[in-house]
Amino acid sequence: MNQAVTQMFSVSFSKYLIYQKLDILVMSNMSTGKTAYELRGKIEKIEIELSELNKNPPNIQEVISSTNTLRLNEQLSKINNKQNELISAHAQYSSVMEKLLTAVFEIQMDLKDILKEQSTLISSQAKKKPKAKSKTK
């Protein structure tokens, strides 16, 4: 009886510790989630701006003339800058997603450990209970 109470307390305490860890992970990752959301918005905005810049690609014939060379250079510089912004935003977004994925894997491992522990407790309780033998005549 005393062992059963101790085992029940152990399982309850394990659950409590996991919930505490989950709370800490959730609270620390809330700001990460917000950052991911903001970065995703930034990526979308940059992609739209880049799309608008690419709508009117320069005509090669006009590039030959010296008056349009400056305009082309400016256009290409803007495109290059936007592409660099997009690459940077994707790198930041990937970093945030890696952190979130790491947190998910940590939670998964903790849950596996709890399941193993509970399975062990259940099987040890089942072994300790004597099975009722049926009498046949």
Image (cartoon, helix red, strand yellow):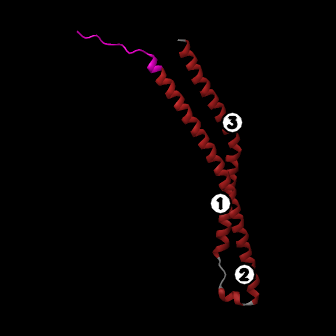
Residue 16, quarter of picture: top right
Looking at the rendering, the stretch of residues picked out in magenta corresponds to 125-137
Q: Position of residue 55 (x, y in %)?
A: 63, 74
Q: Nearer the viewer, mark 2 or mark 3?
A: 3
The CA distance from mark 2 to mark 1 is 25 Å
User: Do callouts 2 and 3 mark residues in contact (Cβ within 8 Å)?
Assistant: no
**Sequence-first disc among 2 and 3:** 3
Residue 25, quarter of picture: top right
**Sequence-first disc among 1 and 3:** 3
Q: Secondary structure at mark 3?
A: helix
Q: Which residue is mark 2?
A: 72
Q: Residues within 10 Å of mark 1 (few under 14, many from 20)?
A: some
Q: Which residue is mark 1?
A: 44
Q: Residues within 10 Å of mark 2 (few under 14, many from 20)?
A: some
Residue type at mark 2 is: Leu
**Sequence-first disc among 2 and 1:** 1
The CA distance from mark 1 to mark 3 is 31 Å
Q: Which mark is residue 107?
A: none
Q: Position of residue 21 (x, y in %)?
A: 66, 34
Residue 44, quarter of picture: bottom right
Q: Position of residue 41 (x, y in %)?
A: 67, 56
Residue type at mark 1 is: Glu
Q: Quadrant of the C terminus?
A: top left
Q: Which residue is mark 3?
A: 24
Q: Secondary structure at mark 1?
A: helix
Query: In terms of depth relative to the viewer, which is nearer, 59 or 8?
Result: 8
Residue type at mark 3 is: Ile
Q: Nearer the viewer, mark 1 or mark 3?
A: 3
